[in-house]
Structures are given as C-alpha cells and as structure tokens.
Image: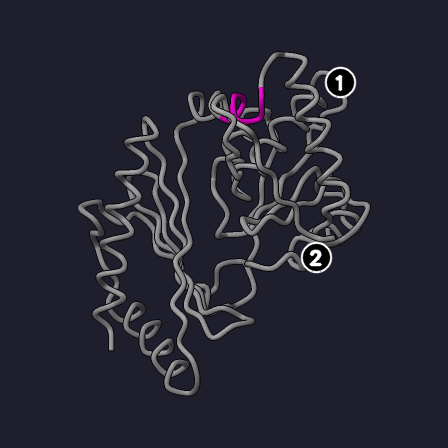
Amino acid sequence: ADRLGVAVRDEKGKYVILTGNQLGALMIDYILQMRKYKGNLPINGVVVKTIVTSSLGVEIAKSYGVGYLEVLTGFKYIGEKIKEFSEDGSYIFLFGYEESCGFLIGDYVRDKDAVQACLVAVEMAAYYKTKKMSLLDRLQQLFEEYGYYREEVVSFTLQGIEGQERIGRIMDFLRENVPEVVGGINIAVVKDYLQPTGLPKANVLHYTLEDGSWFCVRPSGTEPKLKIYFSVVGDSATDAEARLVRLRGAVLKIINGIE
C-alpha cells in the first residue's frame, strides 16, 4: 500500500476523516517532538513537501529548527531529493509528504509508503491516548498555535481534444492576465513554473496572497482534468472557512469565465 487514510472518532462518536494535509502535519509534529525529546533531532534535518501541500507542516518544522524544501507534484521528486541528500550530505531527510495522502518517514525507500506511515499513525494515536487526547485534540492544539489552516481541491473534468484545448486556453489566459487582487486580497507572489524557479519546468501557476492564502492551477498529469488547489489560514475555524469560500468563489469565477 502506498497511501494512508485515517479517520478519528470525535466526542460525539462520529468519525472524522483527516485530510492528507492534516495527517502530514500531525506526523511532522509527532516525529520532530519525539526526536527532540530523545536528543536525536539533527541540525541539518529537512522536511520535503509538494508545492500544492499545506504550509502548516512547514510552520511546525520551522518551530523545531528544521528546514523545509518544496518540490513539484509527484512523489518521485521527493525521492530525487533523498538521493541528492545522500550524495551531497546537505540535509538529513526526516519526512516527506503530499496532500493526496502520500507519506514517507526516513530514507528507507524512495516513494510514498503506507506501511511505515501506518505504524507512525498508530504509535502517534497511542501516545496521545496516554495524554487523554485524540489526534483531533492534538490537531486543534496545532491550529491554535499556528493558525487554522483549511484546504480544498476543485477539479474540472474536460474530456477529449476540446477539453484539452480549453485547459490550454485557461492556462494561457491566466498567464497573460495576471490578477492583482483576488477575493479582495492583493496577490503578493506569482510563480509560473514554466519559467526558471529552481525546479523542473512544469505547466503550473501558483499564486500567494498577502494574507498567507494561496491557490495553484495545473492540468492533471494522469487525467483529463484541470485542478485548482486552495489553502487559507485564519484566526479561527469559522474565519478560515469564510476565507476559503471567498477565495474559491473568486478564483472559480475567473476560471468559469474563460471559454
């Protein structure tokens, strides 16, 4: 198995499914917490995530003094970084993940591995149970400490040659008409991965807003889809949800207006 899904029973007995972003953040926090406790947290440790994965894990890693790197979507790019680190000794790989529930702990293999991820998830749940906490309780603590993160992926299925042509027109339009404001928030940084970014060239556009929110647009590499990733951070769960609704609505209005 290569991917792991986890559901946690809440105080009302209802199961809550953790997202890949949430589970990854919990794992980063737990692994670094335990390494620090045992005194084996390396000074050149690093966490690697894809560009469409939440920034919550990054903020957690930074709080432990651990570095982070971003790679393109696809776990092969995380595997390539592990190979690079083993050859040049620049970093010690501690954890890699992507929002689509792929996780890797340590450099034992070079692809997402649900077996080791499952072991960490079970150990993590057992540890927090000794503290009379669930994974949901710890996630809430992380939100309170680092901000309430909320993510979503919206996909447009566009079949056939006409669909591919429309995807091309949408990407071309977005490149030629870079918005300055989306959902009432100024755009701070735009990355076009067809231009030099330090990563391999890819047909991907990434927009970071001044409030820390971001969205990313890319054609799927395996399906006839255009995928739009959204990530926001708010002061509360309600605030984060409102920010997500506003950002998603503004971006989809632009996308839907492109013929």
| Quadrant (top left, top right, bottom left, bottom right) of the C terminus | bottom left
Q: Residue furthest bottom?
A: 161
Say which mark, if any, is on residue 80: 2
Vertical comparison of 218 with 128: above or below: below
Judged from the image, the secondary structure of the residue bearing numbered disc 2 is: helix
The residue where tag 1 is placed is: 39
Tell me the residue at 60%/48% (across/down): 101
Tell me the residue at 33%/32% (across/down): 234
Q: Looking at the picture, how far across and down is residue 79, in whole percent?
A: 71, 54
Magenta region's main secondary structure? helix
Q: Could you tell me the amino acid type at mark 1?
A: Gly
Vertical comparison of 205 with 6: above or below: below
Q: Residue furthest right?
A: 108
Vertical comparison of 20 with 111: above or below: above
* Residue 30 found in image quarter: top right
Instruction: Measure the C-alpha gap from mark 2 to mark 1.
Output: 28 Å
Residue range of the region highlighted in magenta in the rendering: 134-139
Q: Looking at the picture, how far across and down is residue 172, in whole percent?
A: 32, 75
